[in-house]
Image: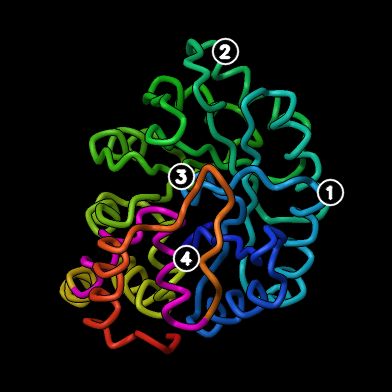
Amino acid sequence: MFRGAFTALVTPFASDGSVDEHALERLVQHQLNGGIDGLALFDITGGETGLSLEERRLVLEIVQRETEGHCFTMAGAFAAETSNAIEIAVEMDWVGVDGILAAAPQDAKADRGALVEHFRRLADVVQTPVIVSNVPGRTETVLDPETLAALAEHDNIRGLYDASGDLELLSSVLASADERFTVLSGDDETTLSATSLGVEGAISNVSNVVPRHWTRLIDNALHGLTEQARALHDELSPLMSETRTVAAVKAALAMMGLADEHCRLPHAPINDTRRAAVAHALAELELTGKST
């Protein structure tokens, strides 16, 4: 079910901080035109997890209307406390996404037993399959193989989305995972290596900008066309390096005329040096001023 190329879709904002509905429609169509297999909304690697439930409903309504079932949808249920994460997960379950992304509460630094209980309680109250997100760069918590093995025993915890870039961890998880447990990469720069280990796809930041390139890269990699996948990876590598943050992704999208780059605090627009680097990476791909 969760196989292929996914995008950690950014949420576009208007100058007043509200969700930019028309820009969101453009971004979704950009993804569909690029052949993307699925969209991950409110994703923790994108950094914009603070939307209200009402805003999440609005975003999902637009995404589901625009996609018309032509790609999978996942939604993040991230919060500082388990009860709040459960509230979000229940709402996402009710509106009908295909998967719910769950991560360790930020800055919780909980012990293994508490972490396992956090994920289990969330998975207990929803019908939608839960994908565990391992994003230590955001949560400051590393989900080790033992913790992940314990989580995989739950009937409704159906996979791992790993953005740690730790290939040794991925290898360990893949070695013990059964066929019902999906493993996805969440780190653009190590995704090609991860596919060689056996991951079934990837959730990407750079594919906000270049969904067609990313879809081809993943498709080639999953079908064993290593040379073609490597060529695409090398071509995208500069842009991958420059689009690790939501602000950088939005700057690139603005340069392509797809959305403004407004962010909500504590996120801030990138500086002029980074902006020049993003512009250069786009120019190298001949993308400035157009979508692909």
Earlier-in-chain disc, 3 versus 2: 2
Residue carrying label 1 = 94
Disc 3 and disc 4 in contact, CB within 8 angstroms: no
Local packing at callout 2 (Cα closer than 10 Å; few below 14, some 14-19, many 20+) is: few
Instruction: For marks 1 and 2, give the CA distance.
Output: 26 Å
What residue is drawn where x is 72% and y is 71%? Answer: 21
Instruction: For marks 1 and 3, give the CA distance.
Output: 22 Å
Q: Give the range drawn in magenta.
A: 235-257
Residue carrying label 3 = 161
Earlier-in-chain disc, 3 versus 4: 3
- State yes or no: residue 252 in magenta: yes
Drawn side of residue 229 relative to residue 116, left or right = left
Secondary structure of residue under mark 3? strand
Instruction: For marks 3 and 2, give the CA distance.
Output: 20 Å
Which amino acid type is shown beneath numbered disc 4? Lys
Instruction: For marks 3 and 4, give the CA distance.
Output: 23 Å
Q: Is residue 145 above or below residue 258?
A: above
Residue carrying label 2 = 114
